[in-house]
Amino acid sequence: MSTAAVRRFDLYDFFSVLLPGLALILGLYPFYPQGLTISSLGAVLPLLAGGFAVGRVVHSAAVRIEDWIGSKGHRDLFATEIRHSPTLDRATVEAFYECCRSQFDIELTKDRTDLTDDAALGLYSVVRSHVYIDSRGRSQTFQAISAFYRSMWFVSVFLAVLVFLYGAFPAIQSAMPYPTKIATLSVPPQWFTYGAIILFAGSYTTFREAKATHRELFVQYLITDFISLSSP
């Protein structure tokens, strides 16, 4: 079990927590005090610790914002896949559902299209627990990468807004309690706007679209992983 726990940390926490946290810390580097440096070897461990702590905040904020705007999550896609099979073929979903009905002691409708939202949520929980109990299957990989793209999308939008506001409102620059690294470059104000637009557009096409794709792949592999692991 300890080995499995380490693998889960390496997979999910590394991609969805540590890397986005480090990305935010490094992305804020131009706004740090001029005399501050994080390039020395002694800064590696504090940087990693800070990246993990900041990454936790980023991860939680990204989840809450996603819920707030009503974005479809893993559970929603799972319920849709079970009831309507928009991406997987019907035979695969039927085999999965019948396997669940025979294996789990939970109340499931005979016809999968009649499954309620609450029942779908419960089924999702027990299926994921079954697949993840000893880090089996490929679905975990796609879940971790999907969470990584979600957190990176949040980080990119945050940095884009920060860059835009910093360049558009000189009062923000003068209100800084210390001279920033970027202040020494004498960057024209319009460059901040261009940079914010490029950062936002690039992250939209890279992270947001990839998040949606890998989220769908996660649900598909969760279903097929369960079928494979449940086969005699």
Image: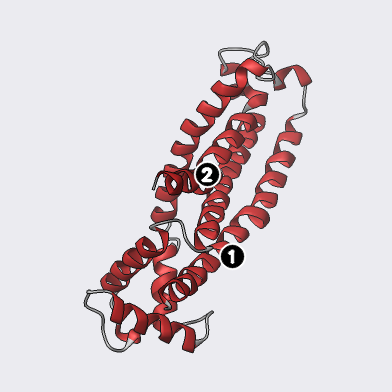
Looking at the rendered structure, the secondary structure element under dot 1 is helix
Q: How is the image coloured?
A: secondary structure
Left or right for 69, reference 30: left
Q: Position of residue 80 (x, y in %)?
A: 42, 76
Q: Please rate how many residues cluster around mark 2, counting C-alpha atoms within 10 Å: few if below 14, some from 14 to 19, many from 20.
A: few
Relative to residue 25, is residue 1 drawn left or right?
left
The image quadrant that residue 69 belongs to is bottom left
Residue beneath disc 2: 10
Q: Nearer the viewer, mark 2 or mark 1?
A: 2
Residue at the spot x=45%, y=73% of the render? 223
- Residue 228 lies left or right of residue 212; in this view the side is left
Identify the residue at horizontal 50%, vertical 41% (top origin): 17
Q: Secondary structure at mark 2?
A: helix
Please tell me which residue lies in front, 33 or 143. Answer: 143
7 is higher (above) or lower (below) than 117: above
Can you give x and y, in whole percent of width and height, for residue 170 in the image?
A: 64, 24
**Label 1 Cα crowd, 10 Å radius (few <14 / some 14-19 / many 20+):** few
- The quarter in which the C terminus is drawn is bottom left
Which residue position holds label 1? 213
Q: Is residue 221 visible?
A: yes
